[in-house]
Image (cartoon, rainbow, N blue to C red):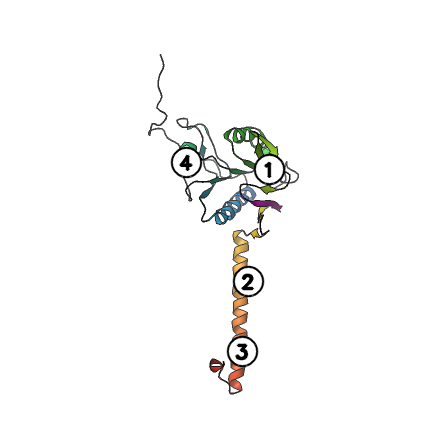
Amino acid sequence: MTIAIDLSDPNIEYPSSDGEPVAETYVHLYAILTTLEVLKQYLTGKQATVLANQFLYYSQGFPRLRVAPDVMVIFDVQPGGRDNYKVWEEGQVPQVVFEMTSKGTQNQDQEQKKTLYEQLGILEYWLFDPKGEWIAEKLRGYRLRDETYQLITDGQSQPLELEIKVEEQLLGFYRMDTKEKLLIPTELAEQLLQERQRADTQQERADRLAQYLRSQGIDPDNLP
């Protein structure tokens, strides 16, 4: 006798958390969060979303078939966050996945996850080892070609149109068209502070000049 299973049953639960830590160490967590924020800002205004450490469900009706990429980028979907991501609802698999790897997760990242992402058709898979525990160059990328991952040798992400570089224990992202760096939050804050200081300096110079002109009997407000 065959028992029919309704895979679209609304009573099937797809949890958004398993109670496990987000990352193995602070270094890995910071690399995840900065990558998430930089790519979110970069893709603002586009039909895309960036998610971090959230379940990717890839088989309807089977909630155990899931994976939680450290960072995943999905194009041609509604922008914004999700509690989890269901491929059959969104109609798209992620195009780019980043895993912040370590010696402890090496086998899982290099074997099980690599095989799964390959089978799902995820175009690019990047492994970043911020502590250099098993990847000497710290960053290793793969691009799908003929349904098989091939090593990326130029450091460029084609779907993102970004060049990716290792910058100590973080990833640096650079636009391929302008070579401009996408700033992380601390760099953005420093840039804003410098701009404010420059503005304050210019205002101080203008005030001193106006004061000098007045001392010479010249009204700076009436200058042509």
Q: Is residue 114 left or right of residue 84?
A: right
Numbered disc 4: secondary structure: helix
In the image, which is nearer the foreground, mark 1 or mark 2? Answer: 1
- From the image, tell me which residue sits under label 4: 90
- From the image, tell me which residue sits under label 3: 208
Q: Which mark is residue 194?
A: 2
Given the image, on which type of amino acid does mark 2 rest? Gln
Q: Nearer the viewer, residue 107 or 25?
A: 107
| Mark 4 nearby-residue class (10 Å; few <14, some 14–19, many ≥20) | few
Residue 162 % position (x, y)? 57, 45
Residue at 60 percent across and 37 percent down: it is: 141
Q: Earlier in the sequence, mark 1 or mark 4?
A: 4
Q: In the displayed structure, would residue 48 be above or below residue 12?
A: below
Q: Is residue 17 left or right of residue 102?
A: left
Q: Earlier in the sequence, mark 1 or mark 3?
A: 1
Residue 197 % position (x, y)? 54, 66
Given the image, on which type of amino acid does mark 1 rest? Gly
Q: Is residue 178 left or right of residue 15?
A: right
In the image, which is nearer the foreground, mark 4 or mark 3? Answer: 4
Q: Earlier in the sequence, mark 1 or mark 2?
A: 1
Q: How far, Cα to Cα, is label 1 from label 3? A: 56 Å
Question: The N terminus lies in which quarter of the figure?
Answer: top left
